[in-house]
Amino acid sequence: MANTKHDVIIIGAGVVGCMVARLLSRFKLDVLLIEKDSDIGMGASSANTAIVHAGYDPKPGTLKAEMNVAGNRMYDQLAGELNFPFERRGDYVVAIGAEEFVKLEGLRQQGLENGVPGMVIIDGADVRRREPNINPDVSGALWASTGGICDPFAVAVAAAENAVVNGVTLLTDTAFQDFIMEGTRIVGVRTNRGDFRSRWVVNSAGLYSDVVMHKAGLRPEFKITPRKGEYYVFDKAEITINNVLFPVPSATSKGILVTTTVHGNTIIGPNALEIEDKEDRSITRVGMDEIWQGALSLIPSLSLRYSIAEFAGLRPGGNAPCANPNVKYDKDFIIEIPKQVEGLVNLGGIESPGLTSSPAIAVRVVELLKDAGEKLEEKPEWNPIRRARPRFRDMLPVEQKLLIESHPSYGRIICRCENVTEGEIIAEIHAPVPARTYDAVKRRTWLGTGRCQGGFDTARVVEILARELGVSPLEVSKKGKGSEFLVRPTKEKEAEQC
């Protein structure tokens, strides 16, 4: 593949990069999507709160506000076309006490200024009726009907698969190293797998978007400061929360929320700890205590005995000022074709609400390319539909019976907690964006996320991956090179001892 020529190269296959690739696949362009990790969506896209935000929180006049509201409107059609889980349940900003209640109207007015429809302030009695587990001291809530929940990785993989089926080339384990320049024009990228030439490059590198733009000599003052958010996940058989519950936000964060998910689990978090290490996803005792206390202020009946997992994600927070000179704000998105260099679409600081904003950001990228004189001719054969693969646990018994009769591997349960079958695992290994590691299978099927946290299925998944990929079990890894499960066959060790 090295030294090939493309029309567009996209750096980074998080949800934004995948959405951009999917939309560009609509046109007669040769598009290459590169990702440094072993799978797509392994950064911020795989570890967040999975909320499709209504758009009342961003400061009016910012790109965040504009992209949030525009992206939110697109999710119903996207979910229909790409077949990913999405539920427009709405969300609540919950006020505890009279002092917080008076802040709700200001948040509602901000939402109206941003163009958010369907907001109403309800009283404490109404909140208690809708969510029986809520803090009895609740004084009211802002109800935003357009809020929703999704599976963020499923959004990314669906967009990537649709892009690949429509002609985009995806290369994982391909790390950007530098730009290839001719004067002030970018004509390609250097990677650990060789050089790739192109007419355009899209910087969608998430936590590393500052590093990428600095390689082009752009915005030396811009810096991504990772903002760590920690979470608890609860057993869905023990705790049921029906709603998305935010606290009244602070100046720096939306706060510690309690929410349901499309998979049925309750999660709490995140906090917002600014760190320097862009790979530090460790959890901290102080941080977990912080989110626990924050969650109890909303749902006092929560019990840690039902927590089944803890994790941390990093948001790529930047320090870019708002492009609108009338708005004083220094945490905005960067979405631009800079004047200093040619051939670059520069995206940076795409933190929350980046998931919600991603389809609108893709539209803006296309608009920028057109404004720059790129003649984008649509493919008559472009197919916006990504067919979903069978999910055994969601099927009726008669449907399960028919599926097993035609594909017997769907009759073998590999993950008992989440009812995931061998047939589903095989299908993901051979999908348009294939799952080649345990975590890749986990993110696509949700195996290993239940009460036993993979204790039952891991060995069997390793065996299936080795068989289907045609490799030794010693080569099967958790998340890519360096995370292999096995070091040697046990029989060899026994032979040595004899």
Image (cartoon, helix red, strand yellow):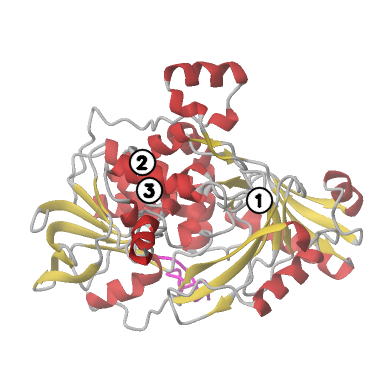
Q: Is residue 416 left or right of residue 293?
A: left
Span highlighted in magenta in the image: 321-334
Find numbered disc 3 in the image and state the secondary structure of the residue it sits on: helix
Tell me if residue 326 is in the magenta stretch: yes
Q: Which of 223/399 is in front?
A: 399
The residue that disc 3 covers is 19
Residue under label 1: 451
Foreground tag (3 vs 2): 2
Asked if residue 270 is among those painted magenta in the image, a careful observer would answer: no
Q: Is residue 400 visible?
A: yes
Q: Residue 17: where, in percent of width, then height?
A: 35, 54
Q: Which mark is residue 179?
A: none
**Residue occupied by mark 2:** 429
Q: Residues within 10 Å of mark 1 (few under 14, many from 20)?
A: some
Q: Is residue 259 toward the left or the right of residue 498 in the image?
A: right
At horizontal 49% and vertical 21% (from top left) the residue drawn is: 404
Camera-near label (3 vs 1) is 1
